[in-house]
Image (cartoon, rainbow, N blue to C red):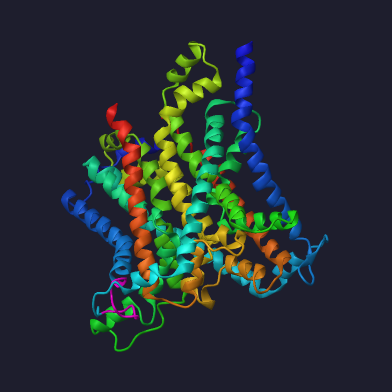
Amino acid sequence: MTLRIIDRIGMGFFLGLPILWIVLFMLVPYGVLLTYSFWIKSYPLFEPAFQFGNYLTLLNEPQYLSVIGRTLKIAVIVSVTALVLAYPFAYFLVFRLKNATIRKVLFFGVIAPLWVSYLLRAYLWKTILGTQGVLNSTLMGLGIIGEPLDVFLYSQAAMVITLTYIFIPFMVMPIYAALEKIPRNLDEASADLGQSSWTTFWRVTVPLSLPGVVAGFTLTFCLCFGDFVAAFLVGGPDGLMVANVITSQFGAALDWPLGSALAVVMLVVVLAIISLSDRFEQRAKVQF
Amino acid sequence: MADIALTRSKPRKPPLSIPKGAADGAFITYASLLLAFLYMPVAILIIFSFNDSRVLAWPLSGFTLDWYRTLFANADLLEAVGNSFYVATLSTALALCIGIPAAMALHRFAFPGKALFRRLLLLPIALPGIVTGISMLNFFNLMGFNLNLHTVVLGHATALLAVVVIQVFARLQRLPRSLEEASSDLGANALATFWYVTLPNIKTAIVGSGLLVFVLSFDEIPVTFFLTGRDNTLPMYIYSTMRRGVTPEINAVGTLLILFSVVLILLAAFLTRAPGRKR
């Protein structure tokens, strides 16, 4: 009996602080965010109100919808690109590479950039793609182009390259983990049943690795969707993202309520993606 | 089942026509290309930090350490480095103090609302930093708090808590249950078991996740952007310098940052590996 009471105290000890933290620094701030999104901008900052004006502005002014659309588009392209690049790599590591040490080293080689400054990794591409940058001078040195091109930097393509570069570790990690969990005897079984390795790949390996793919896609998509650093460095006006617009509402434009409404939209989109992928994961769970 | 039977009755397909050696060759080439894509830009950054021209373009014009000398004479930059160390240290401590008990609770106890609890804990890892930053900014604004390095610390701890929870929880799941049961059978209560049995066994996960939180906090932009007052952290300082374009000084700071990351990676690899070997 006493043991149980002590265990209960223990549970309170372990749970108390985290719950307090979640309520104080997540739930309450999200609530405040939602509240502010109904307020009205007024000099010098804003005043309390309950109206949907900010949301209507987002719907009615085409610039906001087009920014949201562009952000979705870039996030999808980046996630697909990262997936296409990451999957063969992870597959090679898990299924083709026999040497466990080399496998670990290569896996680590892809994950290690996460430890290197994210800002720096975006900046790298600014130095490479710029008019006076490394790519232009390389191409000129090789005689491929006569004078520097300014098409590389400040474009959506630059955004896609940079964001893919930054977020690809987030795609490799879950796919690698999912592939590693697939029992090898399934491969053998499929081969014994006369399937070619190609069929085995598409009908055994790919379906079983889908949870990892979905997890990687979700992470990459959400992180891209909320990014403003890459757009600031390599995006230009054509690569402006939702997060950049939010930033300017809290900066120069000084319209906190509108910025909050946009942030709520972002939060809703991200939560929707996360819960979709959760639902998928629940359904795809396979017991071995 | 019917599916399998059908494919079986068909004539046996020829095995994949590409010979295995060629396929492996293609995979190796591909893996090398991907790693080159990841590391070439970093190499370029480092090379140009030693080049004595303000323009970052080939051909290299000569070797210099001037850009590094300018850095160490830059008082604003040095102050920003100090601020970043301060913020990262406090954030790491906080994230560990909250993350470890949270991971324990997830691992050990069943309680109502556990699924929601887990989801909320892990949310900030997928949630864009800007949402965390803005909601906390609004909250602090409503409360009338002044923004300073401590509000940044609270933001970082919230955003990075999930890193600790994920890594510590994963380690706890791999611990043999029997250890804790034995401790319990010997009459230790939950707290004693945690302190004397569980904690020593998850030490490496704690160190590893702590170092990662430190690095991520040291490097954080989106949350810091909204929650800092007049004081700049290092990434914020660099970010504002980048407005003025590409400069070799940024390359020099970048190179030092990369060096710092490499040291921490090695430290993490070393610290998290040692106990495994003993076993």
Q: Residue furthest bottom?
A: A146
* Left or right: where B213 falls relative to B22: right
Which quadrant holds residue A258? bottom right
Report the predominant secondary structure element of the magenta stretch: loop
Q: Position of residue B90 (x, y in %)?
A: 53, 47
Instruction: Indicate the position of residue A42 as horizontal and vertical percent values.
Output: 79, 70
The magenta span reads: B48-58
* Residue at position x 24%, y 85% in the image: A143
- Quadrant where the N terminus of chain B sits is top left
- The answer to whether one can see residue A269 in this image is no
Residue A205 in which image quadrant:
top left
Number of disc labels:
0
In this view, the residue farthest toward the right is: A49
Please name whichever residue, A249 or A169, is drawn nearer the observer in this view of the structure: A249
Is-magenta flag for residue A90?
A: no
Tell me: residue B254, above or below residue B102.
below
